Amino acid sequence: MRHDIVSDVLYGLNNAEKVGKRACVVPASKLVKNILLAIQKNGYIGSFEFIDDGKSGSFSVQLIGRINKSRSIRPRFAVKKGEYEKWEGRYLPAKGFGILLVSTSKGIMTQKEAMESDTGGRLVAYVY
């Protein structure tokens, strides 16, 4: 039984990268799809495709060897539009290195996109 699908997906990606695999299969949901799109757009993974197994399905993700660490953030802290630098300092190893994924009213986006659109939200995960 799963409690946090985001953690399952990010740990799966992280573990597959560590052992040198080129592909990984992770559970599917709308949230996972949006997270994978954001990670893909920032160049941490290659393409991914949905695999329909009759139940909830899964995603097959192509790995390119760019993920050093990926984790979900629990509890999902609320972030105001001017507080992103504080959270970057807490979760990312250096300024400008890695991304924070934020759930906003406009969807899942990185902290850079959220700062540009002047939007706050809830922290979901980080990848570097």
Image (tube, rainbow, N blue to C red):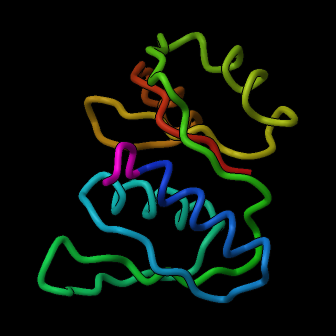
Q: Residue at the location (53% across, 26% down)?
A: 115
Residue 82 place in picture, x, y as percent: 57, 10
Please name whichever residue, 84 or 125, is drawn nearer the observer in this view of the structure.
125
Residue 111 place in picture, x, y as percent: 56, 33
Residue 118 place in picture, x, y as percent: 44, 21
User: Which image quadrant for residue 32?
Assistant: bottom left
* In magenta segment, residue 75: no
Q: Residue at the location (34% across, 52% down)?
A: 2
Looking at the image, the residue that sits furthest to the left is 54
The main secondary structure of the magenta stretch is loop
Please name whichever residue, 104 or 20, is drawn nearer the observer in this view of the structure.
20
Residue 90 place in picture, x, y as percent: 75, 22
Q: Residue at the location (44% across, 81% down)?
A: 48
Looking at the image, the residue that sits furthest to the right is 94
Q: Residue at the location (20% across, 86% down)?
A: 52
Please name whichever residue, 10 or 63, is drawn nearer the observer in this view of the structure.
10
Q: Is residue 40 above or below residue 90?
A: below
User: Which image quadrant for residue 45?
Assistant: bottom right
Residue 92 shown left or right of residue 30 in the figure: right
Q: Is residue 67 above or below residue 54?
A: above
The span shown in magenta is: 1-5
Residue 17 shown left or right of residue 62 in the figure: right
Q: Is residue 108 above or below residue 16?
A: above
* In magenta segment, residue 4: yes
